[in-house]
Amino acid sequence: MFNSTLPFDGILEYALQDLGVPKAGESQAQRLIALNNFLVERERAGQNTVLILDEAQNLDASTLEQVRLLSNFETPTSKLLQIVLVGQPELKARLRIPELQQLRQRVGLRSQIAPLTAAEARTYIRTRLRIAGSRDLGLFSDPAVDRIVEYSGGIPRLINVVCDHCLLFGYADQKRRIDRQIVGQAVEYLEEGTQPRRRARRSRAASGPARVRWIVGTLAVATATAAVALALRFDTTVLGLLQSVRGLLSP
């Protein structure tokens, strides 16, 4: 599950629907009984059931405690439901609060994924390119990858964002390889989000044009990104649009 803003009732209903359990009634007790019966049948068939909660650091203590109670579904010989909590480092701190002591004691395995090294990031980027169908897995040069890791701190989510912007800039400039310079342009653009406000403090007269230019540039990038996603081949119209966007972003 990816929606960590739901209360426990919402999580339970979502899980039942994902598992294909028929509507079991309106009360929480009826839904829990239906889930238990479903899990028993799967266990008899030799099947395992796993509930994965992503972004679990956003769940409040009450919801996490009720999730813990789901681990009580068991037979005399085995657990019927395996629960995996996935989240940011804040999840570790949340599990330390006194209200979640029983949940913390139930955790049988802990694992923390460290930021990617430059070598791991290079493999990660190549894998993403391969899955996307790229013919050139060396599209990002080694110095470019080093700069991406330097900026992102090795966090995959940030690596994805930087790479997306690099591809946009590279395509607009008709580059066949992403080098360190293009990464620098992408990083500069990502950091630009806070610069118009700083300029506005220096000069009220300059703040108007700067803000308008920033808004226009942002909308243009959003449009250009959609165009890239829809383009099935190298199209001169799309290229012209992206080059126009490139001009808006240039100082």
Image: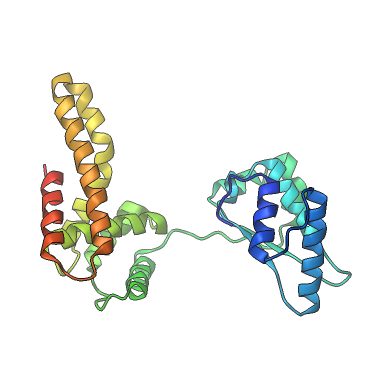
* Res. 188 in view: no
Q: Locate residue 128: give its quadrant.
A: bottom left
Q: Locate residue 61: give its quadrant.
A: top right
Residue 168, horizontal then vertical, whole percent: 22, 58
Name of the residue lying farthest toward the top:
204
Residue 181, horizontal then vertical, whole percent: 16, 57
* Front-lying residue, 93 or 247: 247
Q: In this view, does 1 lie to the left or right of 129?
A: right
Quadrant containing the N terminus is bottom right
Quadrant containing the C terminus is top left
Q: In this view, does 82 lie to the left or right of 238?
A: right
Q: Which residue is drawn at 69% across and 60% down?
A: 16
Q: Residue at x 27, y 43 (%)?
A: 191
* Res. 217 in view: yes
Residue 193, horizontal then vertical, whole percent: 27, 39
Residue 12, horizontal then vertical, whole percent: 70, 53
Q: How many labels does the image show?
A: 0
The image shows residue 98, relative to residue 45, as above or below, that is: above
Colour theme: rainbow
Q: Locate residue 14: give its quadrant.
A: bottom right
Q: Is residue 89 left or right of residue 38?
A: left
Name of the residue lying farthest toward the right:
76
Q: Which residue is drawn at 55% across and 59% down?
A: 112
* Front-lying residue, 225 or 83: 225
* Front-lying residue, 74 or 187: 74
